[in-house]
Image (cartoon, rainbow, N blue to C red):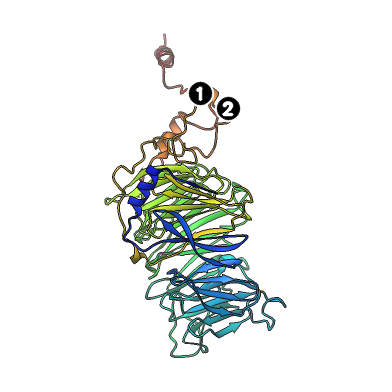
Amino acid sequence: REVRATSKQEDLMMEATGSTNKPMHIIERGTEGASLRSMEGGLVGTVVGHYSASQTVFSSDGRLLACILQSVVEIYDTSKYSLLRSIPVPGTVAVHFSGAASYLVVCQKANFSGAKDGKNLSVWELSTGVMVFSCFQRTFNKNDWPTLQFSSDETVACRVVSNEVHFFCPSDLNPKLKRLRISDVFSVKLSPGKQSKLVAFVPELRGQPGNVQLYNLPSFQDDGVLESEPLARKSFFRVQEVEFKWADNGAAVLIHGSSEIDATNQSYYGESSLHFLRADGSFDCKVPLDKHGPVHEAAWSPRNDEFIVVYGFMPAKATIFSSDRCEPRYQLGAGPYNAVRWNPFGRFVCLAGFGNLPGDMVFFDRKADGKYKVIGSARASCSVSAEWSPDGRSLMTATTSPRLNVDNGFKLWRYNGELLQHVEREKLFEAKWQPSNKSAYTDRPISAGSVRRDISGFGNCDESGSKKTTPYRPPHATSGSGNFSLAKAAPGEKGPGKYRLPDTAAKSTSLEGSHHGPPGSHFVSSSTGKSAAKNARKRAAARAKKNSGP
């Protein structure tokens, strides 16, 4: 069942998306398979392709679609909606396209129903359908996939083995092998861009701190084992796993470290940290976060000049840092947030709170002077995923199974938080946009009159994005009414503005606004009021009389 937007919203969406750009598509997968649907007038339209699949994976440019079945992986050309190649790989767990979609990396189950000969990790050349490389992969971790990585230009491929990183030339994967010796290496990540770098993580072992090391890629002129000094090394304790987040141009990387145990006993879910490292090794630091608590998410702007970090105990803070020296430059406020989504051009950004949070979303517009303005808010309850469209004008949130088995479906939101369309499904396993090259669309500012006027208390909106009307409640009655929430920010912390250091002096000298008492209570300062001043004068006069003596 589909709930479409009003005629006014349809007109706004058609104006926003335009008619000169490349058509967009979404793919949704349910119990009957996957369906590729076109976008018509900014809304979900007709089905243009139907595929049988238990998983679907697009290439980075959206040109190819891989559909995983029980015994084969089928490759489709999305421009013609035709089958391009069928690869016989039973028991496939995951697939990944190389940067230019020339190769497909396949991981199979390492048992009788999968790769029977034991070599469950393979690389296939899509132009010929020939397997060009295979090996045994002991374990599969979704967070570390793909375990065999390609550089953006497909000139280098690499994978981690015991105490080494193996490098291959994709044109000849087997004979030309270069090995980089890194003791106890656990995971690596190749940087995007023309001159790729390698960052490697070594966990904490035998009392030694864990560390991240940065390397140049080796040359293929000489074979053998290479032991070279890293360009940079960053060490830290209490980090068991890391997630590397490279900037799109490969100039810097964010290192999101996490541990299952919090040594300070402040969080049941462990502790996390965030570090910054430039690709040339000239600068590294710990990202200066001014609030205690976990690092919920960090995301680079597609413009590569800044990144956003959502951090701290609820209400979490969102701060923008520069990409050159990792300095805080702007803050987006505090609230019930744990996710951030940039649009493909870095113009619009959405702060949201999913999972165990109510699903509040706030939309910002980046101005030419680097400031951010709130342009709308909404609530997408029970959302599992959120993704911007390739043209950067709408956001899709989805509620999918098995994470949630009720209220499945997806919603389309305008860049200012207006609900455009709600598509309901009995059972939905995934819903996502078909990727596209950024050059296929143009970056355009917000349309005239698009700024929402009901955002003074953003986050206080219903499913449609309209302002909720609530009855008046006196301040003394809110503490027992169920409206109190630790995720709600103070009025002075909600809105965006230039970064300001925490005013610790004011917090230590004033009890006004303190949260150490019962919810809804207000402390009275002893230094204010007429009675306090009168008593102070009496005490001063008594001290003066006592000191003067007889």
- Between the residue at mark 2 and the residue at mark 1, the CA separation in whole angstroms equals 9 Å
SS for tag 1? loop
Label 2 Cα crowd, 10 Å radius (few <14 / some 14-19 / many 20+): few
Q: Amino acid at mark 2?
A: Ser
Q: Which residue is mark 2?
A: 481
Q: Residue at x 28, y 45 (%)?
A: 448
Q: Residue at image x 69%, y 81%?
A: 116
Q: Are marks 2 and 1 in contact (CB under 8 Å)?
A: yes
- Seen at 34% across and 42% down, the residue is 451
Expressed as whole percent of the image width and height from the top left, the position of residue 160 reads 56, 76
SS under mark 2: loop
Q: Position of residue 99 (x, y in %)?
A: 44, 74
Q: Nearer the viewer, residue 281 or 520?
A: 520
Judge from the rendering whether residue 106 lies leftward or rightward of residue 442; answer left or right: right
Instruction: Please tell me in which quadrant of the rendered image residue 251 appears.
Output: bottom left
Give how far across and how far down residue 510 sits, in percent. 44, 30
Furthest toward the right, the residue is 112
**Disc 1 target residue:** 473
